[in-house]
Each structure stands twice: as structure tokens, then as C-alpha cells.
């Protein structure tokens, strides 16, 4: 395999307006990942969507607090989410492996190395890792922000060449998106502060807004990894980013030049 890419698909890409999982969108993302693999890219998928999948499966009559509800929907939904990915990738004869993790696993050296080794052996055996946060055991204060932070840690851990954050916006705007003169910022250097352009709103279905994406993007670009923020609802976005990057709307965080070793 050639380049290594981490693709993060947010809740707002995989969730319909009614809060349930968008299987059509999932299928489109899978088709694009298959294209990347056929073109010699190693792909690690960081996927949200477990809570949305669980919400569609179970109607809760009695009142649950937000943590209990999240844990319940996540536990049910993760099974469904991975099952759907399994069936979609199986059509292309691609094996997948599930990686459920949490923030503590990136702090302890032994756990960090174990997780890295697990994912490395999956890639070496042509298995596609699908990563998500283990919401069933995570304490709220230690949760990732809608997998943005998680995908950044995975990209650094696995020495990726590129991290692609797919959201429901085309990139970072240089002003109010509703103003006709506003444009997408095509590239941001790793050391440039663009906080003036960032609205601190979170997405309706996820826990991450543009603030968390930019924080992750700066952090990962500083580690020498290119980061792209793009719209996961745009048809063939992953393919177009590779085939027609100049014509495809996105914001690229330019990687800090480092002497990186090959995988």
C-alpha cells in the first residue's frame, strides 16, 4: 500500500434529520473508501453513528438521563453500525475489524502500544480498521468531542500521511456562511490562528463543532500530517479530493515539514 489515510465520518454526515442512521450515506462512503484502497491507499475509518443507529432500534418509554441514554443507544447501535459496515464492505470482499477505544488508552504507554500494534497488524493483513469511542464505559468528562480528537490521536499514533475530517460543511469559511461574499479558506498553515472565523456551535447530532475540528487540525498538522476538512454529503468527496483537489471545495491544513519515516 502507498499513502496512509485516516477518514473520520461525523455524526452529522451519517445521521438523517429524524436522528436515525443514514444507510444510503454510509454506503456512499464505503464505495469511496473502496476506491481509495484500489488506488493503493491504506485507510483507517473513524466512524460516529452508533447512537443514531441505536436510536432507530429502541424506543425508550421511561426517562433516562443523557449519559444513560447515550450508553444504551451506543451499546445497541455499535452492533448495528459495525454489522452494516461488515455487509457493505463484504460486497467488495474487504475484511473489517472493530476498534473501540477511549481517551485513557492514549495516556498509558502499554495500552497505547497495544492499540498501535493491533491496528498495525490489521493493516498488514489488509483488514480495514473501523474505530469508534467506547461510549458504554466512558465518563462524560473524558469523552472525545465527536471523534475529532480521537481521529487526530489515531492519525498521529499510526503515522498517517493525511487526516480527512468529513462533516456537513464544505470547509472553514472566512466569514458568515450566510453572506454571499463569504468563501471557503482553501489552505491554512499549521501555525496560523484562524479562531476569528470559527463559530463555537456544536452539530445537532454530534458533540463536536468547528472549534474541535480546527483544534484537532492544528494539532495534527503540527505533527507533520496533512489535514482536510470537507463535506461528507458531497457526492464522491473522497475521490474528488484525490482526483480533482483544485476544483473540490475543502480546507487543507498544511502539514509542518518533518523528516518522517516511511511506514
Image (cartoon, rainbow, N blue to C red):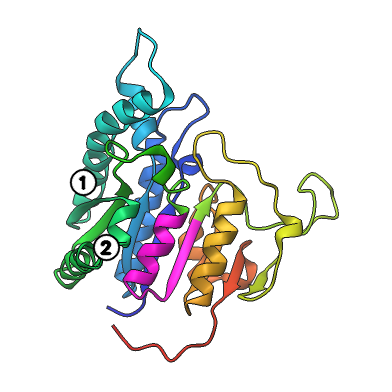
Image quarter of the C terminus: bottom left
Question: Residue 7 appears at what percent x and percent y?
Answer: 41, 60
- Numbered mark located on residue 86 in the image: 1
- Numbered mark located on residue 108 in the image: 2
Question: Residue 3 appears at what percent x and percent y?
Answer: 36, 78
Image quarter of the N terminus: bottom left
Q: Residues within 10 Å of mark 1 (few under 14, many from 20)?
A: some
Q: CA distance from mark 1 to mark 2?
A: 30 Å
Residue at x-position 74% and y-position 56%: 197
- Camera-nearest residue between 172 and 37: 172
Question: Residue 51 appears at what percent x and percent y?
Answer: 37, 32
Q: Residue extending furthest top?
A: 61
Please say whether residue 153 is one of the residues in the magenta stretch.
yes
Residue at x-position 33% and y-position 70%: 157
The answer to whether 8 appears left or right of 194 in the picture is left
**Image quarter of residue 50:** top left
Q: Secondary structure at mark 2?
A: loop
In the image, residue 74 above or below residue 58: below
Residue at x-position 43% and y-position 42%: 141
Across the whole image, how many numbered discs are drawn on residues? 2
Q: Residue extending furthest bottom?
A: 259
The answer to whether 66 appears left or right of 193 in the picture is left
Magenta stretch, residue numbers: 149-165
Residues at circles 1 and 2 in contact by the CB criterion of under 8 Å: no
Residue at x-position 63% and y-position 61%: 249
Please say whether residue 143 is visible from this viewpoint: no
Between label 1 and label 2, give the one nearer the viewer. 2
Please say whether residue 239 is visible from this viewpoint: yes
Please say whether residue 76 is one of the residues in the magenta stretch.
no
Amino acid at each position: 500500500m502507498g499513502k496512509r489515510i485516516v477518514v473520520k465520518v461525523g455524526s452529522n454526515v451519517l445521521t438523517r434529520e429524524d436522528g436515525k442512521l443514514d444507510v444510503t450515506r454510509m454506503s456512499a462512503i464505503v464505495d469511496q473508501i473502496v476506491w481509495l484502497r484500489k488506488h493503493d491507499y491504506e485507510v483507517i475509518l473513524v466512524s460516529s453513528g452508533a447512537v443514531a443507529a441505536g436510536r432507530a432500534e429502541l424506543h425508550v418509554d421511561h426517562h433516562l438521563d443523557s449519559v444513560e441514554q447515550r450508553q444504551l443507544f451506543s451499546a445497541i447501535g455499535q452492533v448495528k453500525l459495525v454489522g452494516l459496515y461488515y455487509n457493505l464492505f463484504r460486497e467488495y470482499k474487504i475484511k473489517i475489524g472493530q476498534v473501540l477505544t477511549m481517551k485513557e488508552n492514549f495516556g498509558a504507554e502499554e495500552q497505547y502500544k497495544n492499540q498501535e500494534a493491533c491496528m498495525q497488524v490489521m493493516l498488514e493483513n489488509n483488514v480495514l480498521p473501523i474505530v469508534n469511542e467506547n461510549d458504554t464505559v466512558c465518563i462524560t468528562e473524558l469523552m472525545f468531542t465527536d471523534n475529532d480528537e480521537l481521529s487526530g490521536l489515531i492519525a498521529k499514533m499510526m503515522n498517517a500521511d493525511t487526516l480527512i475530517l468529513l462533516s456537513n460543511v464544505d470547509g472553514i469559511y472566512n466569514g458568515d456562511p450566510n453572506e454571499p461574499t463569504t468563501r471557503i479558506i482553501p489552505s491554512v498553515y499549521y501555525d496560523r490562528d484562524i479562531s476569528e472565523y470559527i463559530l463555537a456551535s456544536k452539530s445537532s447530532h454530534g458533540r463536536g463543532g468547528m472549534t474541535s475540528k480546527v483544534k484537532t487540525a492544528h494539532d495534527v498538522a503540527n505533527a507533520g500530517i496533512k489535514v482536510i476538512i470537507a463535506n461528507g454529503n458531497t457526492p464522491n468527496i473522497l475521490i474528488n479530493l484525490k482526483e480533482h483537489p483544485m476544483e473540490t471545495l475543502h480546507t487543507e491544513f498544511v502539514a509542518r515539514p518533518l523528516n518522517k519515516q516511511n511506514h
